[in-house]
Image (cartoon, rainbow, N blue to C red):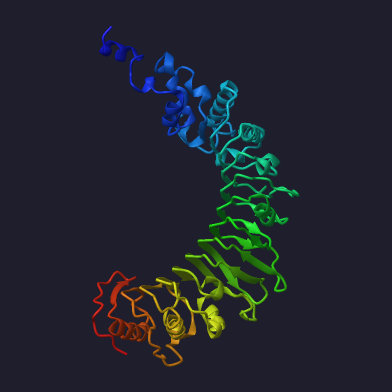
Amino acid sequence: MDQAGKSRRGDGDRISSFPDCLIHLIMSFLTAQEAVQTCVLSKRWKNLWTTLPFLHFDLSKFKSDEESDVSESEDGGPPDKYNKFRDFVGMTLLLRKASDLHTFHLSCPSMCEWPEYNMFITSWFLYALNHNPQVLKIDCTLAGSVPLAVLACASLQDASLSYFSYFKRVPNIKVINLPCLRRLHLSDGDLTHGFVEKLFSGCPMLEFFHMKYCDRDLYSINSQSLKYLKAECCNWHEATEKEIVLIDTPNLLSFSDIICLDFTGPKLLLKMPSLTSANIEFERSRSERSYDGKSNILMGLSNVQNLKLSGDGIKVLLETEMPNCPEFSNLKDLSVDSLCLSCLCNLLASFLNHCPNLVKLSLHHSGISYCKEEMHGIQEPLRIVPCKSKRLQTIEVKFDRNDETFPQVMKYLQDISKKSKAQINMTSLNNWEVDSSEEVSQ
């Protein structure tokens, strides 16, 4: 039989001649539903899916009988597609050969609103953990605590756990043992009971840690392996001024967090000698007593090459820590995103004097604020402190042209530009065309 005839029969195509491991790699780009459907291609493909080490179950790919995504069926029960998804996942895992998993991805967040599915979701989770996964991504909620097995999975290298229910608490355990874990993303969890400290104690290889929408108690991180640390919208749980948060990470390269400069908050000590990039949002204290500079934030960030500061607490930070401000000799790129740049002008000028190698300065007036300087004009005269950097090339400014105090800031920036020969690129938040060389009046 000629080659064309074999191709028409489906047993002579080139892909089918590949070894199983290579075909599995190709199938890894498919959802589990699509992978199972390949069984009809030919005899060669009939059982390939049963040993597939990459499983991706996605509820959003399923449709109800009426081809809609309604939140419930006509009789008030769960949507029809939920039962289809439950049956498909259960049957796929039942018929699958007992081989190890590389990747297990389960995405069904809305399904967890119906308690009758919780035991199925838990059983799928446990199936994955019992088959030595290297990558685990769970985008759904378990009614109750997370199965303890996920915190003692020796094969796990990359984990992403997201929860969306009222039952968010991480189990109160004594030991975490994840010897191969390198990347961890936790979302919408209650990381109390000393969880974070236990995590780093039990994860000697952890390099990337990202937590989002989590409640966290006070912790100290002491890690030789950690390189990337990011916290988004995470609250300190019952923090007091007598407590200390120590982040001692000698090999950390990137740090992103929201820091509240609160007199009643914890003392934050940063030891990050290898840090190259930081993105910090500073929240202003809600206490009547202001931040007293008890933390060493500027000192801890002084080795960075790229630094982004944002939030309405920047002024408090600079006012308090500027007298002991270290030299930012490695800093090349500084971005300041503040509600009011005009009230920061003198402080920013002083800070720039500690940045001898700065190449790019970006200033962003992020919207309407209620600071006294912006509403009534700058109360103290601008102190023109020359920018120490002789390498400054670019000043990018995004501003609100309705801010009456901004021309004074612009005069200072133009003075910097003339002395350093840096180019000023201006963008108005009001969508007006701006000529950076235009005359700025008082």
> What quarter of the picture does the C terminus occupy?
bottom left
> Residue 228: x and y, percent?
53, 57
Please tell me which residue is depicted at 45% across the width and 19% down the height of the picture.
Answer: 39
- Could you say which is closer to the camera, residue 41 or residue 290? 41
The answer to whether residue 64 is visible is: no
Residue found at the very far top of the displayed protein? 1
Q: Identify whether 274 is placed above or below 12.
A: below
> What quarter of the picture does the N terminus occupy?
top left
Q: Identify whether 84 is placed above or below 383.
A: above
Please tell me which residue is depicted at 58% across the width and 38% down the height of the picture.
Answer: 111
- Could you say which is closer to the camera, residue 167 or residue 202? 202
> Residue 85: x and y, percent?
54, 29
| Number of numbered tags placed on the structure image | 0
Q: Is residue 234 left or right of residue 305?
A: right
Q: Identify whether 253 is placed above or below 42.
A: below
The answer to whether residue 259 is visible is: yes
- Could you say which is closer to the camera, residue 405 or residue 8? 8
Please tell me which residue is depicted at 65% across the width and 59% down the height of the picture.
Answer: 216
| Quadrant housing residue 128 | top right
| Quadrant housing residue 196 | bottom right
- Could you say which is closer to the camera, residue 208 or residue 356? 356
> Residue 215: x and y, percent?
64, 58
> Residue 214: x and y, percent?
61, 56
